[in-house]
Every structure is written in C-alpha cells, then in structure tokens.
Image (cartoon, grey):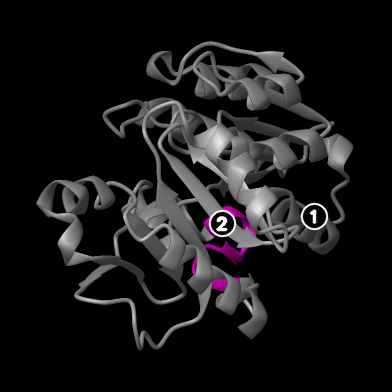
Amino acid sequence: MIKLLATDMDGTWLTAQKTYDRAKFARIMQLCREQGVKFVVASGNQYYNLLTRFPKEYLPEMYFVAENGSFVLKGREVLNIVDLDPDEMRTMKQIEKKYAGRPSVWGGVHSAYSLKSYGDEYYRYLTQFFEKLTMLDSYEGIDDRFFKYTLSTKPGESSDFAKKLKREFPSLDMVAGSDTAVDISKVGMNKSVGLKLLGQRYNISPSEMVAFGDGGNDVAMMEYAGTSYATASALPEAKRAATAIIGSSEDSAVQDKMLELLS
C-alpha cells in the first residue's frame, strides 16, 4: 500500500521550461486526499522557490523536503532544520577559497547568497531555483544558518567533480545536484533523511513510499523508498538506484505514473 509519494523537481516533476500539467497535479492531490497519501516535494532547491511552483490552496496538504533534506516542512510549518556546525563551516570555507574561480551559491535558512561578480547571466540562471536570493560583493559576514554550498561545473562534469571533492574533503558529502552543479553538505544529509523523519512522524515505512528522481542528490532517497522511478534523462547513478526507468519530465511521465499508482 502506498502512503507517501516523493518527487524531485528539476528534471523530474518540472519540464525544462519549469512547468507541469496543473490538471494532473490537481487529480493527484485529490486522490492523495481520498487515500490518505502524503505528497512530498523533495528537492535540493530552496523551500521558498518550491512554494512558488504550486497553487496556494494545496500548500497546507503538502510536505517539503528542501535543501537536500536539511529543511523539512508541512506547508509553512517547520518540522526540522539541520544546519552546518562550526567545524563543517570551516571546511566549507576552505572549499570556497580553493575553488573561488567557480560560480557558487550558499544556501541558508533565510536566503540563498551569491556574488555580483559572477555576472548578470549567472544571476538570471539562479533565479530559476531561488525565490529569495541575495547578491553580494563578498561572502564575508553573512548572518544566517547554512545548509549547503553549491559549486558550478561544466555540463556533464558534476558527477566526476563530486567524487574529486569527496576525496579532498571527506568530512563533507558531495552529490551531483544536476549535470552542472555539485551540492556540498553535512555528511549523511540527503533527501532520505527527510523521508525518514516523515516516516517516523506519520508511521510510514520505506516499503510504503514511492520516490521519483533524476540526479545524484536523489540516489539516497530512491534507495530508501521501497519503490523508485528515474526519468529518462536521469544521471546514470540515479538510474542505477531506481526500481524502474520511466519517460521524460517533458511528457509528464512522473505525473502519469503517480496517477497510475494511485488508481
């Protein structure tokens, strides 16, 4: 029996144009309500960005595992925050210094932060993923609690760069959030942590969960859930972790599979 559906966003739920079939979503939410199924958005993206993707009337019924599991909410109610401790922040600063030439983003509770020096094109790119985004002259002196640090890569290089970073800085976790970015966070912090929290809170076992994803940051979640699906364009590591491969996000494959499962 299915009690929880969890989906990644970019490359999974959303098309390349950041859209999805709203009518199918409404039908999914209706079936979830009727059957007592939790609908979970599990993303490396910022919570405030995720909020903008869905009609407000559904938010009280939705769950969010944002920032790769570090920020878990039911609607607007915060259920859990796991931020970086002082030792982890010092290591993050070492990474920031060593790879200062790569565009980057700090993910915090109140905002995401990046640098003006990366230019207007990078800023416009970031606005796809961050509703709250602060552009700075320097990363020094930010007053916030941080979840992760993201470094940009060339297309297709993120998986290999994540492995390289892990060898250099084993005290932190690195995953390919997409084919052009590596997310760096607390060891053991991933989307499965958020699913486990929700499972414990609502008495849902992994075997009663279904997860959908496409990136390296979806692997732990897909392995944790009893059933998981990777989209056709998923990274190789996500496909290996999946129970099965479905179609493309461009063709509403995730929405169609959810409707099939709920029906």
Q: Does residue 190 sit above or below 179 in this rendering?
A: below
Quick check: is 125 in the magenta stretch? Answer: no
Q: Is residue 245 visible?
A: yes
Q: Which residue range is magenta in the image?
A: 66-78
Nearest the eye: 199 or 81:
81
Q: Does residue 253 sit above or below 31 in this rendering?
A: above
Query: Label 1 to label 2, Cα distance in Å?
Result: 21 Å
Q: Are marks 1 and 2 in contact (CB under 8 Å)?
A: no
Q: Residue at x 56, y 28 (%)?
A: 214
In this picture, residue 94 sits left or right of residue 167: left
Q: Would you call the spot at circle 2 few (<14 residues within 10 Å), some (14-19), or many (20 or more)?
A: many
Image quadrant in which you'd find residue 15: top left
Earlier in the chain: of badge 1 and badge 2, it is 2
Q: Nearer the viewer, mark 1 or mark 2?
A: 2
Q: Amino acid at mark 2?
A: Ile
Image quadrant in which you'd find residue 33: top right
Quadrant location of the N terminus in the rendered image: top right
Image quadrant in which you'd find residue 100: bottom left
Secondary structure type for disc 2: strand
Q: Residue at x 69, y 49 (%)?
A: 167
Secondary structure type for disc 1: helix
The residue singled out by tag 1 in the image is 196
The residue singled out by tag 2 in the image is 184
